[in-house]
């Protein structure tokens, strides 16, 4: 098998990839027996010459050595890595391994353990995805809030109601394994090779359900409405958990995949003196633009081309005077802004889009970094910091889960207050001053960043552009330290994993962390 990198194809090209591969290999097209796409990215740096950049793998009927002898450096022989053979450990596992949280980390920890015959128990405080979807939709339509089943809590975790982006900066050979599991569970085939793969919230709901069903088919168990309210910890050892305040479940091994919004669980862990650290996070607003504005900025005259779809962006601004950074986060092309509260009396925003990204609206969080000096020295001070500004947004919105919105012109004092478009957030919005629900250092940095972003994307800071407050759940405000074997540094048997433990920053990295956590359990324990 040969791999060909950096094959550039004009957006107008209609020639088969096999013909282009044969040209690169300097062989007849008929000599190619099999071809697969490994990676496809868009190069839009030259708006009048947009190209796709492919990496291909091909199998030919010509000896590979003969082809390599006269090929460019773009052509290499494929060397497959041998998957790690995981051998079960020696310590007997007398109790069923327990995973707390059915987000990406929890699902992949449970799936991996189930595949190795460990028959895990997966506990989720929220509801299964179908019931959860009905609860969330009711909240968006009526403002009727459910603290146990919402955008943050329930099967699939917070990512279920998002864009379903599968991009990651983590370079790990197991990432392809995770993508394969997603495809097996119903994700689109193209996520295997897209440079910026995404599933969309509509397809992701089916994917997480199918992963759950596979866990069960392999001998695992999944329980919904199972809120872990306390831990039985003695002498630095996890001995059991308390479910819904009354049921005690003995256990030796607990994977803590609680997600970044399980504030009550953090408080219980802190009470038990589980090692925890405050960590930086970011807060800000959601900003919305007509999708065609972003498409035009990124693709020029090719905006709207059927081969391109909705454009995204990634923006960063560094203020040298204050040392603050503002940046775009969780950008959702063709999506909407959604209500994402997990506690009564708070307004939280997030972005969501379906697989087709066809809403006509581009939205993204624009956030500013927050460090421990901004919050206080206590480990859980970041939670209180987030909660305070969520509550301020709730008050500004009229205490009905309506969100406060403001135009860029009103926010910066540089223009008209007329809305460029109707805000997409539901159940509704109220015109208000976002300075009243954000720290001064955040609003000051956002004002500077908006001007900078407008220079990079024409029209980004149009005076009528809508901003919605507040975006506070960019990442966990704490980290639960662990050793090289993924075990809590001071509680044996406790395995912190994923975003909630401070070790991931998205669906893929969380899934990988859960998988690696499970492999460490397997290496340590044998089924008794």
Image (cartoon, helix red, strand yellow):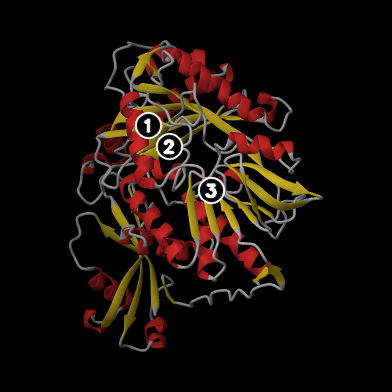
Residue drawn at point x = 32 percent, y = 34 percent = 137
Q: 478 above or below 141?
A: below
For image coordinates 67% across by 68% down, the residue present is 525
Residue 476 x %, y %: 58, 38
Q: Earlier in the sequence, mark 1 or mark 3?
A: 3
- Residue that numbered label 1 is attached to: 338
Q: For this rendering, which residue is in front, 442 or 91?
A: 91
Q: Could you tell me residue 398's position as x and y percent?
A: 41, 13
Secondary structure under the numbered disc 1 in the rendered image: strand
Mark 2 nearby-residue class (10 Å; few <14, some 14–19, many ≥20): many
Q: CA distance from mark 3 to mark 2?
A: 14 Å
The nearer-to-camera label among 1 and 2 is 2
Residue, disc 3: 101
Q: Residue at x 38, y 41 (%)?
A: 132
Position of residue 51 in the picture relative to residue 225 (left or right): left
Which residue corresponds to the image point at 67% horizontal and 37% vertical from the top-left?
268
> Are dots 1 and 2 in contact, CB under 8 Å?
yes
Q: Is residue 39 visible?
A: no
Q: Residue 140: percent from the left, percent from the top? A: 34, 29
Q: Which residue is mark 2?
A: 151
Crowd class of label 3 (few under 14; some 14 to 19; many from 20; radius 10 Å) = many
The image quadrant that residue 163 belongs to is top left
Q: Earlier in the sequence, mark 1 or mark 2?
A: 2
């Amino acid at each position: 098998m040969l791999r060909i990198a950096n094959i550039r194809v004009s957006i107008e090209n209609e020639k088969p990839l096999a013909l282009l591969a044969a040209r690169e290999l300097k062989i007849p097209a008929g000599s190619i027996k099999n071809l697969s796409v490994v990676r496809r990215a868009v190069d839009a740096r030259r708006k009048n010459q947009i190209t796709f950049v492919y990496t291909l793998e091909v199998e030919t009927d010509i000896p590979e050595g003969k082809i390599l002898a006269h090929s460019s450096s773009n052509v290499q022989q494929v060397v497959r890595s041998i998957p790690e053979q995981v051998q079960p450990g020696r310590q007997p596992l007398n109790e069923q391994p327990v995973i707390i949280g059915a987000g990406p980390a929890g699902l992949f920890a449970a799936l991996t353990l189930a595949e190795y015959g460990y028959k895990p128990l997966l506990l989720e405080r929220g509801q299964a995805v179908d019931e959860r979807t009905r609860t969330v939709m009711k909240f968006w339509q009526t403002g009727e809030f459910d603290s146990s089943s919402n955008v943050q809590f329930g099967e699939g975790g917070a990512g279920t109601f998002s864009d379903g982006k599968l991009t990651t900066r983590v370079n790990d050979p197991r990432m392809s394994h995770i993508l394969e599991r997603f495809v097996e569970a119903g994700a689109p085939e193209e996520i295997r090779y897209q440079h910026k793969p995404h599933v969309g919230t509509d397809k992701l709901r089916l994917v997480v359900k199918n992963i759950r069903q596979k866990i069960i088919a392999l001998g695992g168990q999944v329980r919904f409405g199972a809120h872990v309210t306390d831990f039985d910890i003695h002498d630095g050892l996890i001995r059991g958990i308390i479910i819904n305040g009354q049921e005690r479940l003995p256990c030796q091994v607990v994977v803590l995949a609680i997600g970044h919004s399980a504030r009550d669980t953090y408080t219980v862990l802190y009470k038990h003196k589980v090692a925890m650290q405050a960590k930086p996070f970011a807060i800000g607003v959601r900003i919305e633009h007509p999708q065609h504005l972003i498409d035009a900025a990124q693709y020029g005259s090719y905006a709207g081309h059927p081969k391109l779809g909705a454009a995204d962006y990634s923006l960063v601004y560094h203020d040298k005077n204050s040392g603050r950074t503002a940046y775009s986060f969780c950008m959702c092309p063709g999506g909407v802004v959604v209500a994402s509260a997990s506690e009564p009396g708070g307004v939280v925003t997030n972005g969501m889009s379906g697989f087709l990204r066809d809403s006509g609206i581009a939205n993204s969080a624009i956030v500013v970094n927050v460090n421990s000096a901004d919050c206080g020295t206590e480990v859980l001070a970041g939670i209180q910091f987030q909660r305070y500004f969520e509550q301020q947004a709730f008050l500004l919105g009229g205490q009905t889960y309506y969100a406060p919105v403001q135009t860029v012109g009103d926010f910066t004092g540089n223009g008209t207050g007329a809305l460029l478009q109707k805000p997409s957030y539901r159940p509704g919005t109220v015109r208000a001053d976002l300075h009243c629900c954000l720290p001064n250092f955040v609003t000051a940095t956002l004002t500077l960043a908006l001007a900078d972003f407008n220079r990079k994307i024409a029209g980004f800071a149009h005076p009528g552009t809508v901003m919605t407050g507040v975006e506070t759940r960019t990442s966990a405000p704490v980290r639960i330290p662990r050793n090289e074997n993924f075990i809590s540094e001071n509680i044996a048997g406790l395995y912190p994993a994923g975003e909630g433990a401070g070790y991931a920053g998205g669906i893929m990295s969380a899934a990988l962390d859960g998988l690696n956590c499970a492999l460490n359990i397997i290496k340590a324990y044998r089924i008794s």
